[in-house]
Amino acid sequence: MEKAYKLEFAASQGGSLYNTSCGCSKTEPLHYFGPAVKPFYLIHYVISGKGVFSCGEKEYHLEAGYGFLITPEELAFYQSDKDDPWTYVWVGFTGTQAESVVEQMGLSVSHPIFFCDKSKEIYETVTNMMEYNTYSFSDNLRRNGYLSLFLSLIAKRSDAQIEEKDDKANTHVEKAIEYVRLNYCNPIKVTDIADYVCINRSYLYSLFQEYLHISPQQFLTMYRITKSLELLHSTDYPIESIAISSGYLDSIVFTKAFKKKMGMSPSTYRNEMRSGGAQSSKEQLRQLEEFIAKGMKKI
């Protein structure tokens, strides 16, 4: 007999990623499920005890700290150990982004097993999820929030375990460029970029030198100055506002960086541009934009 507390939710709400079920079970010896299929993704995580999970022609013997993925419409079977039956939590989910999320977590039909040492956090996340057990809009939001937290704990494990491959370096650079593109207007630093892509600053520096032949700081400055040039061309905003909009909280620091790159102050550049004497500056703008556009392409 299985001692389980479980919740199931309507799957008709739709969305990019949403919870369909969750639960916690303390099983009896040799308690089993299947072989059977589910219409949604289902992740089990073993809190204690042992058991076996099989999918396709593969069989996995699992214990506390391990988890397994059941993919939609794939025949699966799992059974608790005879002498040390397992206790586990599970979460079901679906949505238009579910398949992509699972792939990015490093899980698939051919690789359904994972290990995660966040047992306490995972258990608390699922039990918290179960507290919001109605079909109300607010409970749906809270439950889906816990779903994201549950998946993030497992994904954190994936980030640490997936081996660095040649194309992984490309991904680091792409993500770093994308982070700059979306956050240049904020007072971010190179350490923030490195933290976002989960590598240290020195490794980020070597990657930028290898792929773009400039440092991350030079790229960040280049992007900010490019955006400030666009504002100087298209608006009458004060220099102080353009500085802040370009990620510089201090207009003096902005002016110094601008002058170093463009050979003149922002005010002088704007005056020459409007009087028709900034053709060379316009050419620099074009070159900067082309360089950034090239860097934004898949490396």
Image: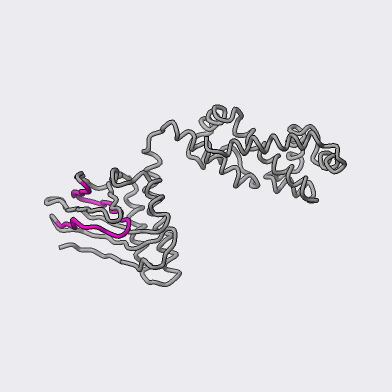
User: Residue 223: where, in percent of width, then height?
Assistant: 66, 39
The image quarter containing residue 58 is top left
The image quarter containing residue 233 is top right
Left or right: residue 181 versus residue 197 is right
Up-down relation of residue 159 to residue 144 (above or below):
above
Between residue 229 and residue 88, name the one nearer to us.
229
Q: Read off the magenta span.
A: 31-56
* Quarter containing the N terminus: bottom left
Q: Residue at x 81, y 39 (%)?
A: 269
Q: Residue at x 67, y 38 (%)?
A: 289
User: Residue 14: where, in percent of width, then height?
Assistant: 42, 64
User: Residue 35: where, in percent of width, then height?
Assistant: 18, 55
Between residue 50 and residue 299, name the one nearer to us.
299
Up-down relation of residue 115 to residue 32 (above or below):
above
Q: Is the stretch drawn in magenta largely helix, strand or loop?
A: strand
The image quarter containing residue 296 is top right
Residue 135 covered by magenta stretch? no
